[in-house]
Image: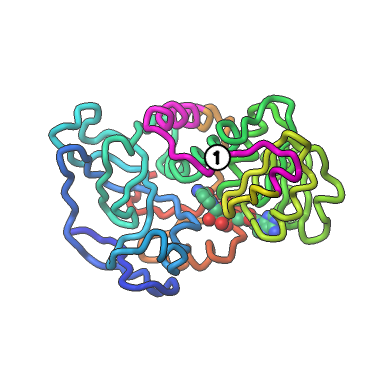
Amino acid sequence: MMKAIRVYQYGGPEQLKLERIPIPQPSSDEVLIRVHTVGVLPYDWKYREGYFKDSRPAIFPYTPGTTFAGTVEKIGRNVHDYHIGQEVFGRSKYGTYAEFTVASREEIFPKPSTITFQEAAAIPGSAILAWLTLFRDGELREGEKVLIHGAAGGFGSIAVQLAKWKGAHVIGTSSGRNLDFLSLLGADNVIDYTSTSFENIVQDVDLVVDTVGGDTLERSWSVVKKGGKLLSLVEQPSADKIRMYGLKTVKPFTPYSPEETKIISQTISQLIADRKLRIVISKLVSLETVQEAHRISQQGHGRGRIILKVYDDD
Ligand SMILES: NC(=O)c1ccc[n+]([C@@H]2O[C@H](COP(=O)([O-])OP(=O)(O)OC[C@H]3O[C@@H](n4cnc5c(N)ncnc54)[C@H](OP(=O)(O)O)[C@@H]3O)[C@@H](O)[C@H]2O)c1
């Protein structure tokens, strides 16, 4: 048996119940993982609240969490590229707020010993997506100007550093309490959204990456130069506005192949190991205190990523 969080109905953080349930068993193409750490994503509380009940309805009871870093505990008979005890990170569709989870072999990647389990847990949910948003979909190049909204958050704090590493000019928005933090991460210009309208001082950016949506997204159109791009993680930007402002069209987020993800995850691991990318951890929680993590995440003012620590060894 193992400890796991289970959710029996949509609702608030109190729906996260700690229980003992049987350890799952991997099929022939899957691997059983001992979970060490989990990246707690805003998606987790949104799913629990029922935001996706029409598009991706939950089958109750379910275990929340999609990302993990851990060790291989057991291997299906068709899996030859991993061994028991190997350190890995990845994603699982079975839920990761648990002592063990199961993942298919395409969803796991080797974790180098030069990065911690806490750092590795932020790669599958946030760092890979930041990479794909900036460099694949956003086509950001050295010397270009990027505006990142929500730059201090779990996603934004990584996006700022990756854009800077690429040699871009990085402008980040956050509240006043996070401005120094953004500068430390490498942002060239920082804007306090509570006191300054970014659209009055920013212009001709090559790329906007929006993690806020609503009014922030609407006010962003005018700051992008003709032929530039506007990407949002929270809303699909209007096709009419893309045409009206002469921006480049970006296909709605396309899934990425295991091969592509493997290369990106290796590059990101190396950047972390070389201390060129810092994974900022805002809070560590346990299975016993994970309700608190959801309460904090739900406020939408994260600084770095909340990590659920399931197995104590880092
Ligand atoms: N894997 C991912 O990270 C991922 C994937 C897909 C979608 N998303 C979506 O992207 C959003 C952000 O995710 P996250 O993990 O980065 O969340 P987070 O860690 O909670 O960070 C949110 C950030 O937004 C900032 N913020 C709030 N209002 C703002 C505004 N009006 N202008 C500029 N910044 C503002 C906050 O800064 P202050 O505290 O300074 O206000 C905070 O740092 C969520 O809606 C999430 O669902 C994330």
| Vertical order, 203 against 302 (above or below) | above
Give me the residue at 31% from left, 60% from top. Answer: 63
**As rendered, which of 43 and 138 lies closer to the eye?**
138
Residue 97 location (% of width, % of height)? 34, 57
Residue segment shown in magenta: 241-270
Query: Whole-percent x and y of residue 267?
Result: 49, 27
Above or below residue 13? Residue 21 is above
Quarter of the image with the N terminus in it: bottom left
Residue 282 visible to an observer of this rendering: no
At label 1, counting other C-alpha atoms closer than 10 Å, the crowd grade (few under 14, some 14-19, many 20 or more) is few
- Please name the residue that numbered disc 1 is placed on: 251
Is 261 inside the magenta-drawn segment? yes
In this view, 134 is above or below 63: above
* Residue 136, x across and y down, in percent: 55, 32
178 inside magenta stretch: no
Depth check: give the residue in front, 183 or 137.
137
**Residue 287 in sight here:** yes
Residue located farthest toward the left when viewing the structure as drawn:
77
In the rendered image, the vertical position of residue 162 relative to residue 52, given as above or below: above
Q: How many numbered marks does the figure carry?
A: 1
Tag 1, which secondary structure?
Answer: loop
Q: Nearer the viewer, residue 89 or 8?
A: 8
Name the residue located 15 percent from the left edge and 38 percent from the top edge: 28
Nearer to the camera, 216 or 247: 247
Question: Which residue of the protein is positioned furthest toward the right in this rendering?
Answer: 200
Residue under the point 36% across and 59% down: 64
Report x, y in % for residue 105. 27, 36
Residue 3 picture quarter: bottom left
Quadrant where the C terminus is found in the figure: top left
Q: Is residue 81 left or right of residue 261?
A: left
Ligand 1 is located in which of the four quadrants?
Answer: bottom right
Amino acid identity at mark 1: Lys
